[in-house]
Image: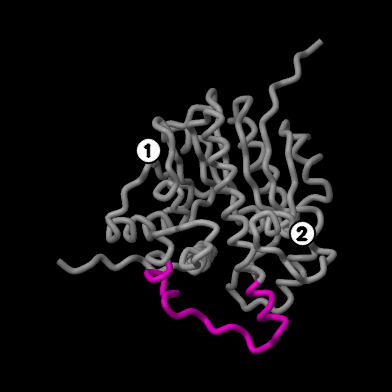
């Protein structure tokens, strides 16, 4: 029987295939920070493996592209650790917002009873499903896909899929918020907060104004950097506290050093505040 031909990636979600390529390259390293056995299959199905677009001739643009790839590796490791810590704390609901080619349902050893919801639009979920079928991939938890646009009524779709807001959840928005305008980011966070029982956790990646300006300056039309629009607030910890979350803020440089991949270039202005966020949902304050 002929192999199924996946739908070709296009639009914003096509950037997820580029992320898969980065994860495949990292997985092949002897000292890999994670192993993603499905990443190469996603990249190949999207036309980015084994070949990929050549690096730019301009040295500055070349360094920026490599820096984006490095940040993907570090954020993946950061959020892997966060998810494992959340599972160890007893959380059994996971929601991946804008899941893209995330394969954590297949590569992390989840505790029994874990339900993992992948929320994304139909096109990337269909593309992903075709690759998973070809690879005969088997999830290590109960995996539930929720096909809905995050700019629309995704909470109702998530509830219909079986998410229980009365139980703690760990939410992941990886490489997502930077593509959303500020009002959409605020609405997304408000919706997450309304569906998070005390003790819920959240992992976010944010981009600073400096990063958006520096990387978007010479970005090719349709590239990931050309689509970045939302910058992190000046005080991410305070911003999340206003939504009822106790947050910790980490820089890429800090986490890279902790993982044995230190950044040797001097710090730049665009590196602060940190764009790797972990947060815990606080219990409501009793009224007097």
In the displayed structure, does residue 53 sit left or right of residue 281?
left
Residue 142, labelled with which disc?
Answer: 1
Lateral position of residue 116 relative to residue 183, left or right = left
Residue at (63, 66) in percent of width and height? 70
Q: Which residue is mark 2?
A: 208
The residue most toward the left is 1
Residue 237 % position (x, y): 78, 41
- Looking at the rendered image, the quarter that the C terminus falls into is top right
Instruction: Write the start and end of the magenta stretch as one range.
Output: 43-66
Give the mark nearest the N terminus, 1 or 2: 1
Quarter of the picture holding the N terminus: bottom left
In the depicted structure, whether residue 39 falls above or below residue 138: below
In the image, residue 113 sits, relative to residue 173, either above or below, namely: above
Cα separation, mark 1 vs mark 2, equals 35 Å
Is 47 a magenta residue? yes
| Between 256 and 127, the one nearer to me in the picture | 256
């Amino acid at each position: 029987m002929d192999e199924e031909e996946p739908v070709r990636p296009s639009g914003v979600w096509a950037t997820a295939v580029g992320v898969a390529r980065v994860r495949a390259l990292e997985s092949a390293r002897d000292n890999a920070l994670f192993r993603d056995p499905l990443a190469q299959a996603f990249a190949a199905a999207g036309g980015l493996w084994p070949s990929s677009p050549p690096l730019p001739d301009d040295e500055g643009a070349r360094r920026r592209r490599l820096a984006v790839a490095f940040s993907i590796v570090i954020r993946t490791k950061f959020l892997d650790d966060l998810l494992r810590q959340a599972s160890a704390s007893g959380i059994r609901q996971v929601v991946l917002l804008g899941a893209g080619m995330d394969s954590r349902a297949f590569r992390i050893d989840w505790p029994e009873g874990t339900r993992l919801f992948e929320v994304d639009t139909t096109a990337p979920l269909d593309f992903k499903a075709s690759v998973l079928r070809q690879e005969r991939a088997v999830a290590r938890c109960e995996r539930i896909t929720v096909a809905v646009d995050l700019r629309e009524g995704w909470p109702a779709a998530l509830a219909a899929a079986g998410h229980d807001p009365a139980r703690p959840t760990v939410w992941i928005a990886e490489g997502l918020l930077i593509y959303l305008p500020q009002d959409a980011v605020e609405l997304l966070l408000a919706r997450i907060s309304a569906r998070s029982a005390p003790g819920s956790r959240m992992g976010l990646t944010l981009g600073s104004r400096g990063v958006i300006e520096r990387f978007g300056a010479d970005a090719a039309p349709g590239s990931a950097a050309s689509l970045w629009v939302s910058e992190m607030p000046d005080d991410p910890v305070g911003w999340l506290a206003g939504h009822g979350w106790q947050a910790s803020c980490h820089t890429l440089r800090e986490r890279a050093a902790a993982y044995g991949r230190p950044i040797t270039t001097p710090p730049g202005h665009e590196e602060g505040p940190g764009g790797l966020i972990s947060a815990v949902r606080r219990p409501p304050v009793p009224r007097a």
